């Protein structure tokens, strides 16, 4: 998070200051990429780049605080993922393996069962992302938006088109499930 | 009961058993909870969430250049020098007009060169085929040894009654004509200085000796009609007197030399 300097950084970036845009980018890109690796791991890098291209196009028109900025960034990325998913599903020859994980996670048992073990052995960011990706899609996405994107419950609710209560419940259930997965992994070790 | 916009299925039904656990989870989600402070059951979860917020590694920011290009090019941002990092020289936009100018300039120069070569080439070709206008053909004859004006063309060329072709010797060109004539008289023209012409002169001398006719030495250009004697006379006054050659051969012509049909010169001295 940029914090108090956000307004000045945003204004400078809107006026062509590359260093200011670099601050925005380096603050948002890691979180964006981690979020995309959970909801669309196969195309995360490409969608992140497309997201920034789209954000740059509308940068001068953006008005809002840092929460609004991050909400805009992640909303743009999520729409790109949905567009990508629709394009893949429209193709008649698309195989099941070609679909991004956003679709595949609806099917149980397709995720790697070793993700939790991996997380316990070497708890770096990639392992943590792998563990979160084990959760049901809504719970995983809510946790990523709350924890990684830093959005509050209301923002996440608006972004996902759900009620704040539903978001709160999904987050709690997701963490409870995560605790259960990690505990199970420790027992089996 | 549920609030507006919350369905019954969204009714808060937290899996955590106690109120402190619920508060702890809220704190975890908002990032204000440290793993070591977490409840025993939540510590592994807290560690995962902290790992999710770890600083970026190198691979995650590898596409910065790509986004920077998009920032520069796609958005068309007004340029402002960066304070914290050195500004890269922006090449694409200032270079484009220079490239266009260079390309257009090179093409124009090439086209102009082609036009000049074509005009010169066609002019030279016309001169050597004798198809230039009479005046131009005479110039080409003198300068690049192109064939002279043919008699038929000379005859068909419009002439005033009794007036010679070319510039009027009594007009404003008289001075230049006199100088040219005098120069030819003293030094000879290009044809008279040619080796073939000299050989011809020598042959004529030998023939003259054989027939016991005294032939005075021939000076190239001598014995020709001298137009505008008055003008020459005032120049000749400052020079030593010219030796008389005694040349009398050939009819006087309006020009120092006349060309025959083949474009060769008839030299009246011979």
Image: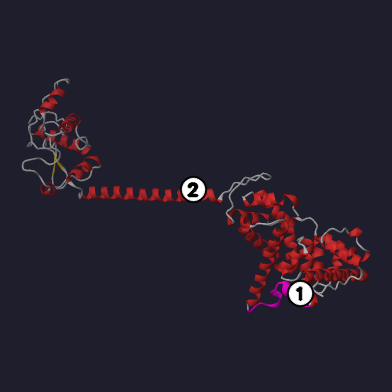
Label 2 chain ID: B
Name the residue tied to disc 2: B98
Q: Nearer the viewer, mark 2 or mark 1?
A: 1
Label 2 Cα neighbours within 10 Å, binned few <14 / some 14-19 / many ≥20: few
Using the image, determine if residue A20 lies above or below residue A86. above
Left/right placement of residue B45 relative to residue B107 reads right
Q: Which residues are magenta?
A: A92-108
Q: Quadrant of the N terminus of chain B?
A: bottom right
Residue A124 in sight in this render: no
Left/right placement of residue B7 relative to residue B204 reads right
Label 1 chain ID: A
Q: How many marks?
A: 2
Residue drawn 67% across and 50% down? Answer: A20
In the image, farthest residue toward the bottom: A92
Is residue A91 shown in magenta? no
Using the image, determine if residue B171 lies above or below residue A180. above
Residue drawn 8% across and 40% down? Answer: B163
Left/right placement of residue B191 relative to residue A74 reads left
Provide residue B34's location: percent of width, then percent of height: 88, 58
Which of the two residues, B46 or B159, is positioned nearer the viewer here?
B46
Name the residue tied to disc 1: A105
């Amino acid at each position: 998070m940029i914090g108090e300097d956000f307004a000045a950084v945003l204004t400078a970036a809107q006026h062509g200051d590359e260093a200011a845009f670099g601050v925005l980018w380096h603050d948002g890109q890691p979180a964006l990429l981690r979020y995309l690796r959970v909801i669309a791991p196969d195309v995360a890098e490409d969608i992140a780049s497309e997201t920034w291209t789209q954000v740059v196009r509308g940068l001068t028109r953006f008005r809002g605080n840092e929460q609004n900025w991050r909400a805009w960034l992640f909303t743009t990325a999520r729409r790109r993922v949905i567009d990508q998913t629709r394009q893949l599903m429209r193709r008649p020859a698309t195989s099941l393996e070609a679909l991004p994980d956003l679709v595949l996670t609806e099917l149980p048992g397709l995720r790697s069962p070793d993700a939790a073990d991996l997380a316990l052995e070497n708890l770096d960011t990639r392992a943590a992302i792998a563990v979160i990706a084990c959760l049901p899609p809504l719970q995983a996405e809510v946790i990523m938006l709350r924890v990684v994107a830093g959005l509050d419950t209301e923002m996440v609710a608006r972004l996902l088109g759900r009620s704040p209560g539903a978001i709160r419940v999904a987050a709690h259930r997701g963490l409870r499930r995560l605790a259960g997965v990690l505990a199970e992994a420790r027992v089996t070790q | 009961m549920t609030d507006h916009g919350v369905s019954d299925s969204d009714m808060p039904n937290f899996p955590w058993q106690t109120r402190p656990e619920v508060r702890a989870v809220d704190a975890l989600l908002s990032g204000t909870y440290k793993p070591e402070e977490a409840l025993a059951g939540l510590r592994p979860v807290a560690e995962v969430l902290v790992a999710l917020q770890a600083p970026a590694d190198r691979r995650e920011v590898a596409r910065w250049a790509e986004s920077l290009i998009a920032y520069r090019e796609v958005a068309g941002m007004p340029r402002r020098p960066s304070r914290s990092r050195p500004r890269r020289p922006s090449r694409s936009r200032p270079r484009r007009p220079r490239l266009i100018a260079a390309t257009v300039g090179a093409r124009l120069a090439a086209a102009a060169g082609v036009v000049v070569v074509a005009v010169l080439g066609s002019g030279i070709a016309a001169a050597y085929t004798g198809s230039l206008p009479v005046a131009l053909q005479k110039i080409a004859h003198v300068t690049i040894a192109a064939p002279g004006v043919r008699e038929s063309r000379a005859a068909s060329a419009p002439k005033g009654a009794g007036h010679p072709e070319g510039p009027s010797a009594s007009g404003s060109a008289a001075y230049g004509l006199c100088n040219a004539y005098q120069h030819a008289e003293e030094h000879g023209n290009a044809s008279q200085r040619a080796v073939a012409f000299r050989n011809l002169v020598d042959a004529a001398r030998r023939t003259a000796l054989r027939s016991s006719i005294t032939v005075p030495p021939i000076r190239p250009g001598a014995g020709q009609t001298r137009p505008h004697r008055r003008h020459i006379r005032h120049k000749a006054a400052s020079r030593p007197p010219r030796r008389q050659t005694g040349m009398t051969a050939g009819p006087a012509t309006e020009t120092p030399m006349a060309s025959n049909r083949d474009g060769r010169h008839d030299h009246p001295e011979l």
